[in-house]
Image (cartoon, helix red, strand yellow):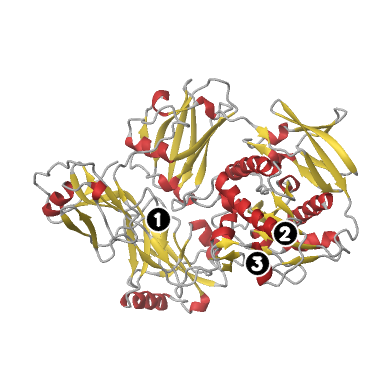
Amino acid sequence: MKKRVFAFSAVISMMISVNAFADFSINGALVAVRPNTAYNINPYNISTITGVGEGNNFAIYTDNGVINIPLDYPLYKLSDAYCDKITCIDGVWGVERNVGIKIFDGSEDWSLYRKASFQNDNTTIFRCPFGQETPRILNGVSTHFDVHTFDSQKTNIYDGISFGESSEEILMRIMNVRNVKDVDTLKTYLKTQFDNGTPVKFMYFLNEPVFTPFDEQIQEQLSSVNPEKVRYVDKNCTGIEIENENNISTDLFVSSNSESEEMNNFMAAVEDAKIFNSEAGKRFFINGIFPEQNSIRFAVNDDNGNVYTSEIEYSKVDFTQSKAVELEFTSEDMPEVIKIYVNFNLYHVPSEAVQNFSYEKTGIKTERIAEKELVLPEKIYVLNGSIIDFNNALLNGTENDGNDIEVTDENGNIVSENGKITADFYGDRKYNVSFNGKTEQITVYSSDAEENIFDNKTFMFLGDSLINENLYTKYFVNTAENSKMTLIGTRGEEGFMHEGRGGWAAYDYCNVQNKYGYDNPFLNDGKFDFKYYMDNNGFQNLDYVVINLGINDLNLKEHNGHDEILSYFDTIIKSINSYNDDIKIIINTPIMLFDTGTTKTAKNDRLQFIKDLYPHFKSGRYKNVYVSPVYLTIDSFGDFKFKTGVIDEYNQDSSMKVTDTTHPNNGGYEALAKATYAFIQSIR
């Protein structure tokens, strides 16, 4: 990786004493605190951003005394790979900057942004030249605004900042209630903020590191430091990094060192790799990385010389998020599909092409050839007329594999060639579901909703946004028709109360007092306490608890391991059992997303979790706990929200497009409610 080096006043010409100890680095941080987390960042909800070395000094305490390291401004961090640091390069100590800062003071060349597709009645949007070296990665952090992509800025109706169609300009959108509707008012606002010491800042990714050496005295002091005995008091510092080696997974690759720093950086960011439709013994290896201004292309070769490529646009990837992004590698002439899952938070884009490797250096292990399989329960309960979609059970499948799911009845008659059946019968019926050379038998029990079976029964729905949207509970009550049931909770609408919170995970219910503007009524002295919740809210009788969690847990940084997620499920269930073990607890499996290539990674994650969820609760470790396979009852295509594409200067496609790949439409919520009803009806 190339380094740009700037001295303070002249090139350092001195003998640097060799460090007798290991080199070390001190990485930056970015701690953003805003007054009210319930609202988006806006001109009146300003974030305070701090880094390492506030006060422009970082002090380290050694056996030889205190070393005060001067900084021109604090060390910041946008991702694990793009963070400022105090480090040693080729025997020279200095500050390496990977984070750029754009400060707005009102002197910029602002104008109204007049693209028709960006106009709405809620906001006014402005533009100005970026005025600094244009970055490739189009993410960042702002003190005063939520940061958007160019595409999301088009539909944004709140305050927001983003790069424009290219990184050469900035777009700033302000809600009309702020009364900033013309250029002069905007400039006055920015200047006032600057003069008051709270300037609008935008922190962005530098294309290449900028290295500034320290003076001779600091060089000599740092070269004599034993990093194992260094101490510090900076509250934002996360530690002294003694070794900076890439952690390449030998479960994924045949070698832990490609002998290229740039390729090692990429391989260390790879969290998973899977090869589909490949013959046994065929070998694949990463052979090239080709960065451009707006995108980056990756190449995988097989040992027959065939090339498989994948390309991403920087504007489509959020490098600030520690979440795997799927790269799909294909070749026009070959049947294989290679999927490599990269945590771009860990990846630093090289400045030039990196290529020409071999299987021995960058080979993907042949064990990564994925086995396609169906994740199915033994039995599913549905109401008559419901659709059962076995495509939702397909783990490690590709775009067209659903066409290969064959469903036959007990007599061997084919009843479906697209993986979907309709329960247009009553009672039990057995089906053989065949895929990839394997056949599994599943029993479907279909019935009508029984009248008055839930009279005087009390329910609680506990979970995430699928409950919080209020439709799930409404359709559940409507399905019951004349049953005189009660739904309890502190949220929702009268008659359809619940305990749903958008974006919440099982982890949050067990650990967090407040998140996204929602309070946690179950937390008592830092612990999930169901009795405390019931007593505190005056609730007494409860017969059923439906838990809809797991999706947000899988996306929760540093807390998304299956064992940890299931431990929080255990915490919730133990607390309910302790309160009253006659309460029946129904755990919904995560539902699948709208079925498209871009959602395959999340779908596989959810199905892998479901594979662990079934046996975890099948052992009978808890009383009255059941797992409901609701993921099979949401149509993977028809139960989601669509809209017609709007023709504008950026889009000439008026076809129907899905608007939300996670939350179903009203029909999907009704299917979910009916599946829950049928399941509870079977265990009542």
User: How far apart are labels 1 and 3 at the CA level?
Assistant: 50 Å
Dot 3 falls on a residue whose secondary structure is: helix
Residue 653 seen from this side: no
User: Measuring 89% from the left and 61% from the top, which residue is drawn there?
Assistant: 452
Does dot 2 land on a helix, a strand or a loop?
Answer: loop
Q: Residue 580, which numbered label? A: 2
253 or 356: nearer the eye?
A: 253
Where is residue 37 shown, x and y percent of the image? 50, 68
Q: Which mark is residue 575?
A: none
User: Which one is in front, 519 or 387?
Assistant: 519
- Image quadrant holding the N terminus, namely top left
Residue 255 picture quarter: top left
Q: Amino acid at mark 2?
A: Asn
Q: Position of residue 555 (x, y in %)?
A: 55, 51
Residue 143: x and y in percent read: 40, 67
Tell me how far mark 2 sits from mark 1, CA to CA: 59 Å
Find residue 533 and name its label. Answer: 3
Residue 572: image location, x then y, percent = 63, 56
Task: Specify which label sits upstream in the sequence, 2 or 3.
Answer: 3
N-terminal label among 1 and 3: 1
Q: Is residue 560 left or right of residue 413?
A: left
Query: Closer to the observer: label 2 or label 3?
Result: 2
N-terminal-most mark, 2 or 1: 1
Q: Is residue 199 left or right of residue 577?
A: left
Residue pointed to by mark 1: 167
Give the quarter of the image for residue 77: bottom left
Callout 3 amino acid: Tyr
Kindly indicate whether the residue at mark 3 contacts the one at mark 2 (C-beta within 8 angstroms): no
Q: Nearer the viewer, residue 601 or 518?
A: 518
Would you call the spot at circle 1 few (<14 residues within 10 Å), some (14-19), or many (20 or more)?
many
Q: Quadrant of residue 157?
A: bottom right
